[in-house]
Each structure stands twice: as C-alpha cells, then as structure tokens.
Image (tube, rainbow, N blue to C red):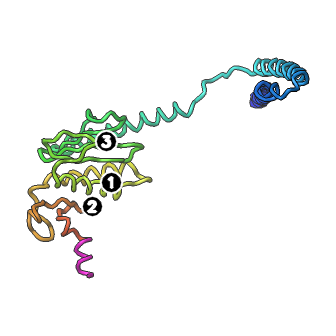
Amino acid sequence: MMEQLQAALIAITVLRSNVDRVFGIFLNDLHSGEQNKQVTCLQGLLSTVNMNLRNVVRKIKNLKPLSHPLHLERMNNFNQQSAEKRQINYMMTTLTQFFGDMTISASNSVKSDISFDITLGYILKAVIIIRGMMIEWIVVKGYEESIDLWTQSRHKVFRKVTENALAAILHFDSVEYPELGVQSFMIWFHTLINLFIEPCKHCGLHLNKFSPPTWRDFHNGEAYHEECKPNNISSSIAR
C-alpha cells in the first residue's frame, strides 16, 4: 500500500514539474522572438504532460481503498480537548460542593471552550481561562462589578488581588500534575473569602495605607499586607 502511494505521489510531482515548464514557455520564451522553436518545444512538453497525466491516473487506480477510517490528528485533538473539558467541569463541580461559599460555573462573559466565573461569597468575582488542564489567565473584580477578561477592576484592592492571583498561578502550575495544580490554586484562592476581615499575620492590623491584607501565603493561606509579606520583611532586615 505504501509503495503504491509513493509511486502515485512521484507521478504527481513529475506532472507538476512539466506543467510548470509549460507555463514557463508561455510567460517567458514565447516573447523571446524564437517563436517557431518554442512552439515545437511546447508541443513536445504538452505531449509529455499528457503522458504524465495518464500515468497519474493509472497509479491512483492501483491504490486500494482503506479498510478502516483514518484517525486524523485533528480528531484526536478534539477528543482530547473534550475529555479535558469534562474532567475540568467535574473538578469545578466538586470544588463548588466542597466550598459552600464559592460558586464556580461555566462563564457567560467569555466565549471560550474552558472558562469559568467564580463568585466568592459576597466579596469578589473572578473569571479564569483554562487551557490544556492549566490555568492561563484570571481577572478579579469586586462583587458588584461586571466581570470580563479585558478590563481591570476599578478598585485598587482587586487589581492587587489579580496580580497576586497571577503569581499564584505560576507558583501552583505543574506540568507533571496539572490537575493538582488547578486544585491547589482554587484552594488557595478560597482563602480570599476573609479578604476584609482577617488582620495581617505580621503587623496585626486590618488596614495598611488604607488597604487590607491582599497577599495570601502559598503554603498556609495566611494573610499579609504587601509590605508585610515574608519576602519583603526579609529584604528589609537584610538592608
């Protein structure tokens, strides 16, 4: 079967090459002044093309029809994406049931294959994009704001939460265990339910420069102001 297919492809290549030579005569040589000579050459080439064409037809007729359907890469990719979507939907449904104060639903604001709207109590909203079992992007806004991927929150606190959430995506991202990475991020994200009520773990205050503790530790979810989070404290001590 493969030898017959290769022979047919070679015949098509030869045919195409000779057809290119025919058009080359029309485009160039017929304007060179030696028309009688070129007409003779053209007649010979057309005869060759005719033989090439008959050869292609004969080679194609020798090909046997496939006894089974081709499994095209596009179809395989589609099936893989469908399986991933079902897996992610199941994961999000499980997380919604586990956290009674966090709702996760298919996004109505973003026309994407795998996108979700997240509502965390009456505190905030977010929209996330997931591709290939990995979180690709997130935007966080206030509970009363309309949610989309293209505009930031009008509140500074939620713009900072978006920045921290993007940092968390990078932290929890796992090529080897992508599903675990998504779950870990969602568990971390749920710690923001106490955004306006939990004091900073370092300074003990609720507000610092009129801002609540927007940073959540990646390991234990403890709340910190941006200026009080462990990395900043270590840098200040070093100086």
Above or below, 142 relative to 157: above
Viewer-closest of 115 and 160? 160
C-alpha distance separating marks 1 and 3: 17 Å
Residue 237 x %, y %: 23, 80
Residue that mark 1 sits on: 169
Q: Is residue 234 magenta?
A: yes
Crowding around mark 3 (Cα neighbors within 10 Å: few <14, some 14 to 19, many 20+) is: some
The image quadrant of residue 222 is bottom left
Q: Are marks 2 and 3 in contact (CB under 8 Å)?
A: no
- Tell me the tag on residue 91: 3
* Tag nearer the camera, 1 or 3: 1
Q: Earlier in the sequence, mark 2 or mark 3?
A: 3
C-alpha distance separating marks 2 and 3: 21 Å
Highlighted range, magenta: 231-239
Q: Amino acid at mark 3?
A: Met
Q: Earlier in the sequence, mark 2 or mark 1?
A: 1
Viewer-closest of 219 and 210? 210
Q: Is residue 70 left or right of residue 26?
A: left
Q: Residue at x 80, y 26 (%)?
A: 31
Residue that mark 2 sits on: 218
Q: Does any portion of residue 4 appear in the rendered image?
A: no
Q: Earlier in the sequence, mark 1 or mark 3?
A: 3
- Main SS of the magenta segment? helix
Q: Is residue 129 left or right of residue 227?
A: right
Residue 46 x %, y %: 84, 19
SS under mark 2? loop
SS under mark 3? helix
* Tag nearer the camera, 2 or 3: 2
